[in-house]
Image (cartoon, rainbow, N blue to C red):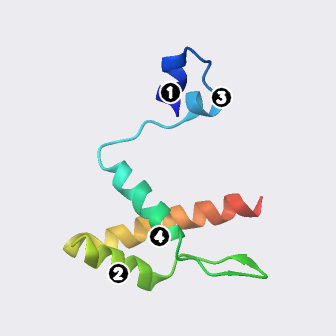
Amino acid sequence: MVEAALERGARLPAWADEAPELLQGDEFYISAFMELSTCRQLGFGGEGQIPWTAMMIFADRYELGDMTDAFVEAMRALDLEYLQWRQK
């Protein structure tokens, strides 16, 4: 989206200037979080957490092995931030 705006000579939205710089490997975690977010339970109380089972299936699918615990910890941290943001 940002690249398309730059090609057209359009002004970038404010969020584009405020976006954090991604480090190598961050895209994997962001993509994983987006995929895993589709596994949330929705109910009267709103959105639920990403299920642990979904994270484990994802970790197995991508053969994370020894990195599985770190992956789950990262997903839990992203999920917590996301759910707090949604409550606001």
Q: Are marks 1 and 4 in contact (CB under 8 Å)?
A: no
Marks 3 and 1, how far apart in space? 16 Å
Quarter location, residue 22: top left
For the C terminus, the quadrant is bottom right
Marks 1 and 4, how far apart in space? 27 Å
- Residue nearer the viewer, 37 or 82: 37
| Residue located at (57% from left, 27% from top) | 17
| Residue located at (64% from left, 78% from top) | 48
Q: Which residue is mark 3?
A: 14
N-terminal of the pair, mark 4 or mark 3, is 3
Q: Residues within 10 Å of mark 1 (few under 14, many from 20)?
A: few
Marks 4 and 3, how far apart in space? 28 Å
N-terminal of the pair, mark 1 or mark 4, is 1
- Identified by mark 4, the residue type is Leu
Which labelled disc corresponds to residue 36? 4
Marks 3 and 2, how far apart in space? 37 Å
N-terminal of the pair, mark 3 or mark 2, is 3
N-terminal of the pair, mark 2 or mark 4, is 4
- In the image, residue 78 above or below residue 44: above
Q: Which residue is mark 2?
A: 57
- Residue nearer the viewer, 38 or 19: 38
| Residue located at (62% from left, 34% from top) | 15
Q: Secondary structure at mark 2?
A: helix
Quarter location, residue 12: top right
- Identified by mark 2, the residue type is Ile
Q: Position of residue 51 (x, y in %)?
A: 50, 81
Q: Residues within 10 Å of mark 4 (few under 14, many from 20)?
A: many
Q: Which residue is mark 1?
A: 4
N-terminal of the pair, mark 1 or mark 2, is 1
